[in-house]
Image: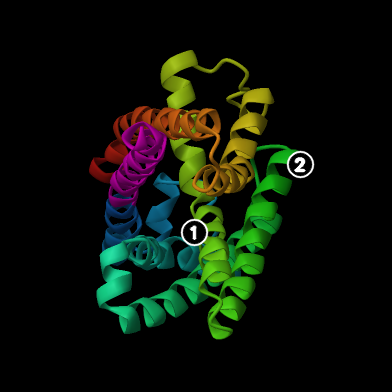
Amino acid sequence: MQTIKKTPNKLLEMSKKMWLTCLLMAQICFVIYLALGYGLTGLTKGISGWSRLNNTAYVASDPTGNSMYALHVLLAIVMIIGGSLQLIPAIRAKYAKFHRYNGRVFVILACTISLAGMYLMIARATVGNTLMHALIMFGGCMVLLASILAVQAARKRNITKHKIWAIRLYLAANGVLFFRLIIFAWFLTFGTLGIDITTFTGPTVLAVSICSYVIPLLIAELVRHAETTTNKIITITTASLMVLISIVFLVGLFGVVLASWYPAIVG
């Protein structure tokens, strides 16, 4: 009986590890893309060469915007790597001092990148509608709020509260990556159904934006509840949801690498 009771919790833990593994794979590919696509191109051709990756990346008459874009993209390389290291239990346990300082760097980078991204959204937004832009802005504001509250909780030695807000910060900071993975999973499965490619608007784009910037925060609360509840149905359902998300990430990663990141690097 005790084994049976533990099974749902084991399934939940396995599903969480599966989700994190899939996300780490996506982050590794994303970092390689950013480093080679933007970093190497910037060194060899100058930032004007970024236009081949994104037509809003470089504007000759806007040095401020170009600087913001550079901060937004290049600092993300360090932030993604540092953020992932924060989630590894062995590092938190054995290298507590590194965890603290790396966490501070992550917070600074996440806030800087989010502020730069919000500036670019206001100054250079060319695709998507107002609702999509609002959801992206929500993600940026969530990064700032979660950073403040995570730091406050850490200073008060409230580890439980700190962990909750740190996870929310991590999810909000990865919203852009979530969007890419989910939208390319949709492309591979349903094509351009519900998407106006010219303006990049439509019900699908809005739904994917919600699934990238809002739903992850709600799922985190569901997982936290599932970890403590005695209701096996909730625990198993949550584990199944995490497995489904992991599959979506893998499908989306396959699509975005082959259709976007790899061609951009070798092109």
Residue 29 among magenta residues: yes
The kind of secondary structure element at disc 2 is helix
Q: Which mark is residue 170?
A: 1
Whichever of callouts 1 and 2 sits on the residue coming sooner in the sequence is 2
Q: Is residue 124 above or below residue 69?
A: above
Residue holding disc 2: 130
Residue 29: percent from left, percent from top: 29, 46
Q: How many marks?
A: 2
Residue 120: percent from left, percent from top: 62, 59
Residue 243: percent from left, percent from top: 40, 31
90 relative position to 4: left or right? left
Can residue 214 be spotted in the picture? yes
Magenta region, residue range = 1-30
Q: Is residue 39 above or below residue 98?
A: above
Front position among marks 1 and 2: 1
Instruction: State whether the magenta stretch is mostly helix, strand or loop.
Output: helix
Residue 174: percent from left, percent from top: 48, 52
Where, by quadrant of the figure, is residue 137 drawn? Answer: bottom right
